[in-house]
Amino acid sequence: MLRNSLVLVAVVGCASSTANAQLQPVAAEALTVTCDDLDLPSLAEAIERELPALERSSAPLPGTTTTARDYAARALRPILALAKADDRAHLCGTLQYSMKWLHVGADRVLFTAYHTPTVRGSLTRDATYRWPLYRRPKDAAARDTTAQILGGALAGRGLELVWLADPYDALALHVEGAGVVQLPDGRAFPVGSDGHNGQAYQNVSKLLVADGKLPPGPPPPSHAPGNPKARAYFAAHPADLDVYWGRNPHFVFFRSVAKAGGGKYGALVAGRSVAVDESRVPMGALLYLRAQKPIVADGTITGWQPMTRVVLGQDTGAGIRGQRMDVYFGEDDVALAAAQAMTVQGDAWVLMPK
């Protein structure tokens, strides 16, 4: 993996290209960063996923006074050309001389990670596969709370999309918003979110922490999705799962998809797609982030190293609010380990053309 160090100078100018008070123009100062720590074809792929949607739109990029079409032409297209040419030197120069850097918020950003998990399931219910993911109802039941649905509000309506072998896997897919269900015959059945019930989100793991149910210290190694401590607690206290899950009113509905792990512009790109709070970050915008990422060996985090790269706001999440961003890591063991343990402070800038 190539890494080029560079001093990027953020030049203060008129902030007329943004109408979002959460984006702070950076003072004229040197920011010593690593230009980009990933392969550039992945950046090109992420940009190409969203270009058609932005180039069709004459509306302002959310939170700015720059139209989506103009942003695509003046920011995305030049970066795309350099990424496709694998021209790291000129990419770094473009970031330095052709972009305005707008810090996201006045404080540092909390970075977490998410991934596309694989779980066991079946298209038919039996003694092993008993926990359903539901399709979206077409009536008022689409507003039912989690407690109502876990209590049987949707039972008997034929809305079960797939049945899972582990109840905590169902909760984990609700948190991640997508996944791959491995069927008994070996086939992969990708599922993605079909929206939610519009209810407020509560983090189940945090509810357990607040009640003193989880032990202190780092999470144990785990090759299963979700919070390892919470998974272990519910395995030992299965009757508590519906109780705590029911305290999170927010419920996700699912549909079958061609490929799991989709955002606002289609399939997400590992390491390049991030989930953002749309009230703070323009959806579809280029961002530069600087934080830490895990070093993973055999599914276990052995250390941390700098993460400095260009990414794109391409997804949202019920728990992604305020000074928080969720980095999509993909589907492998590194992605799983990052999703379970990454909670780091860092900085993020929205990149606007000068």
Image (cartoon, grey):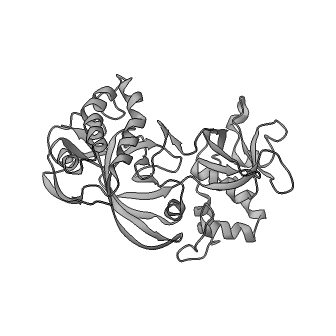
The foreground one among 345 and 274 is 274
- Nearest the viewer among 345 and 118 is 118
Q: Residue at x 32, y 43 (%)?
A: 286
- Residue 351: where, in percent of width, then height? 27, 43
Q: Is there any visible trace of residue 108 in the rendered image?
A: no
Examine the image and state in which quarter residue 154 appears: top right
Q: Judge whether 42 appears above or below 54 on screen.
A: below
Answer left or right for 135 relative to 61: right
Name the residue nearer the viewer: 292 or 145. Answer: 292
Residue at screen point 52% across, 75% down: 218
Q: Is residue 309 above or below residue 238?
A: above
Left-right relation of 131 to 250: right
Q: Residue at 53% x, 47% y: name it.
A: 318
Number of numbered discs present? 0
**Side of 21 where 227 appears, left or right:** right
Instruction: Residue 172: give x, y in percent of width and height.
Output: 63, 56
As rendered, which of 24 and 220 lies closer to the eye? Answer: 220
Query: Is residue 2 toward the left or the right of residue 225 in the image?
Result: left
Across and down, in percent, residue 122 comes to 77, 49
Q: Residue at x 47, y 57 (%)?
A: 113
On screen, residue 35 above or below 318 = below
Which quadrant would residue 169 be assigned to in this image?
Answer: bottom right
Q: Quadrant of the N terminus?
A: bottom left
On the image, the x and y values in percent for residue 135 come to 71, 38
